[in-house]
Image: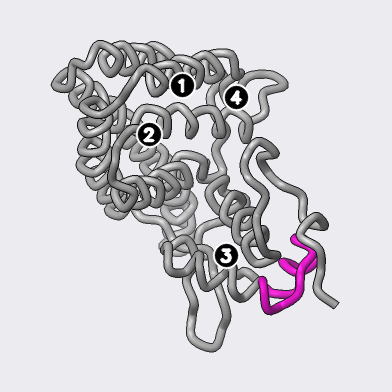
Amino acid sequence: MKRAVAAIPRTDPTEPQPRTVAEAVYERLRADLMAGRYGPGEALRLEPLMSRYGCGVSPLREALNRLAAERLVRAVGQRGFHAAPVSLAEMWDVVRLRQKLEGEALAAAIAAGDARWESEILAAFHRLAKAPPPGRDRADPDSWERTHRDFHRALIAACPSAWLLHFVGILYGHAERYRRIRFERTMPKKLVRDVEAEHRALMDAVLSRDKRRALRLLNEHLDKTGNFIAREFAAAEAGNEAPRRRAGAKAAA
């Protein structure tokens, strides 16, 4: 007997309900991958996933194959599926492509946007500003990520190209995954960046239809995120290198 979609909880009740079990599993698993709940390269074993997402093997395989097409999951021959690995080179590739494609979508949205588009940007920014950022006491990182994603979506929502918006969405998902993977480090209690000020300046430039300034601010905003992630890579590598050096010294002695 077919399982009911309602048996799988939604991560965001404000979004439309999925039409099939496979779609619901895909959305849940994709959200967990982007949140870093599965480490880079971690094996995604079918039985634990079936238990976690309350589904059978067929919808799970369908969801995993969709995620493999988005490069969030890797199919490894006869060894099943693994969470996609991460690398500094790929992260910067994602950032640069996002600057290019999201910048193009933003320029198109500025040209085509109407009063309703403007009001939705304002509402999305208000919700983002009210959401406690990750690292704060009692902050829900998933809630902040949803409002952050909604704000960036609102900025480009008036872009008339559905294909462009689709590809920007895929890149955003990969960028979110890189940002949320902590490399076993905790988010600092106080961020060096004033991210809210960055978002406000970007919103103001968009609403004033200052395309040149908006694109510059978007590129700077994404560069700062890339540099933050790069520092996390460097810190993780330094932490792994120290034990290897100590082990080597002991062996030499």
Q: Which residue is mark 1?
A: 120
Q: Is residue 202 visible?
A: yes
At numbered mark 2, what does the secondary structure look like: helix, strand or loop? loop
Q: CA distance from mark 2 to mark 4?
A: 29 Å
Q: Residues within 10 Å of mark 1 (few under 14, many from 20)?
A: some
Q: Which residue is mark 4?
A: 135
Q: Residues within 10 Å of mark 2 (few under 14, many from 20)?
A: many
Indicate which disc, 3 or 2, sits on the residue closer to the N terminus. Answer: 3
- Which percent across, then down, holds residue 247? 48, 58
The stretch drawn in magenta includes residue 242: no
Q: Which residue is mark 3?
A: 42
- Which percent across, then down, holds residue 251? 46, 64
Q: Which residue is mark 2?
A: 157
As drawn, is 164 to the left or to the right of 143? left
Q: CA distance from mark 2 to mark 1?
A: 9 Å
- Which percent across, then down, holds residue 7? 82, 57
Q: Which amino acid type corresponds to the residue marked 3 in the rendered image?
A: Glu
Q: Quadrant of the C terminus?
A: bottom left
The residue located at (47%, 69%) in the rendering is 68
As drawn, is 131 to the left or to the right of 220? right
Marks 1 and 2: in contact by CB < 8 Å? yes
The residue located at (36%, 27%) in the rendering is 155
Indicate which disc, 2 or 4, sits on the residue closer to the N terminus. Answer: 4
Q: CA distance from mark 3 to mark 1?
A: 38 Å
Q: Quadrant of the N terminus?
A: bottom right
Indicate which disc, 3 or 4, sits on the residue closer to the N terminus. Answer: 3
The picture quadrant where one finds residue 244 is bottom left
Q: Nearer the viewer, mark 3 or mark 1?
A: 1
Q: Is residue 193 visible?
A: no
Q: CA distance from mark 4 to mark 1?
A: 27 Å
